[in-house]
């Protein structure tokens, strides 16, 4: 299961992309938004978003954000 963690600066943006596995993104500090064709979800600190496999999405980080990510095949 691939994992990653990073401190990201305010305004950092990841363009639209998708993954072969589902993705959980967690903000240990700061906040982020996940945007898809179906809407935008806001995740403040201590919250997580789930993106299913193959689903196009982008992320924007608000404030200095301690972001964590893990993937799951389902």
Image: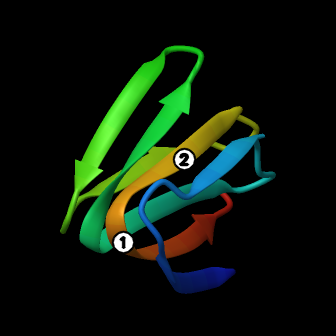
Residue lying at 44% horizontally and 18% vertically, measured from the top left: 39
Q: Is residue 59 left or right of residue 10?
A: right
What is the x, y in percent for residue 17?
A: 77, 42
Real-space CA distance between mark 2 and mark 1, rounded to the nearest whole angstrom: 12 Å
Q: Is residue 12 left or right of residue 31?
A: right
Q: Nearer the viewer, residue 57 or 9?
A: 9
What is the x, y in percent for residue 12?
A: 55, 58
What is the x, y in percent for residue 68?
A: 46, 77
Residue lying at 69% horizontally and 81% vertically, measured from the top left: 2
State the image quarter where residue 36 is shown: top right
The quadrant the N terminus occupies is bottom right
The answer to which of marks 2 and 1 sits earlier in the sequence is 2
Q: Secondary structure at mark 1?
A: strand
Q: Secondary structure at mark 2?
A: strand
Residue lying at 48% horizontally and 60% vertically, measured from the top left: 24
27 in relation to 41, above or below = below
Q: Look at mark 1 in the image and give the residue it sits on.
A: 65
Instruction: Note whether residue 31 is visible.
Output: yes
Q: Nearer the viewer, residue 73 or 42?
A: 42
35 in relation to 39, above or below = below
Which of the numbered marks, if any, corresponds to residue 59? 2
Instruction: Note whether residue 74 is visible.
Output: no
Q: Nearer the viewer, residue 23 or 66?
A: 66
39 in relation to 55, above or below = above
What is the x, y in percent for residue 33?
A: 40, 43
Residue lying at 61% horizontally and 83% vertically, measured from the top left: 3
Local crowd at mark 1 within 10 Å, few (<14), some, or many (≥20)? many
2 in relation to 10, above or below = below
Q: Is residue 29 left or right of residue 16?
A: left
Asked if marks 2 and 1 touch (Cβ < 8 Å), the reply is no
State the image quarter where residue 58 is shown: top right
């Amino acid at each position: 299961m691939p994992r990653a963690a990073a401190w990201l600066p305010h305004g950092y943006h990841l363009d639209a992309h998708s993954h072969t596995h589902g993705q959980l993104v967690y903000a240990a500090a700061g906040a982020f938004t996940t945007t898809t064709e179906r809407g935008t979800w806001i995740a403040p600190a201590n919250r997580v978003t789930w993106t299913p496999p193959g689903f196009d999405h982008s992320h924007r980080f608000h404030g200095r954000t301690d972001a964590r990510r893990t993937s799951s095949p389902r």
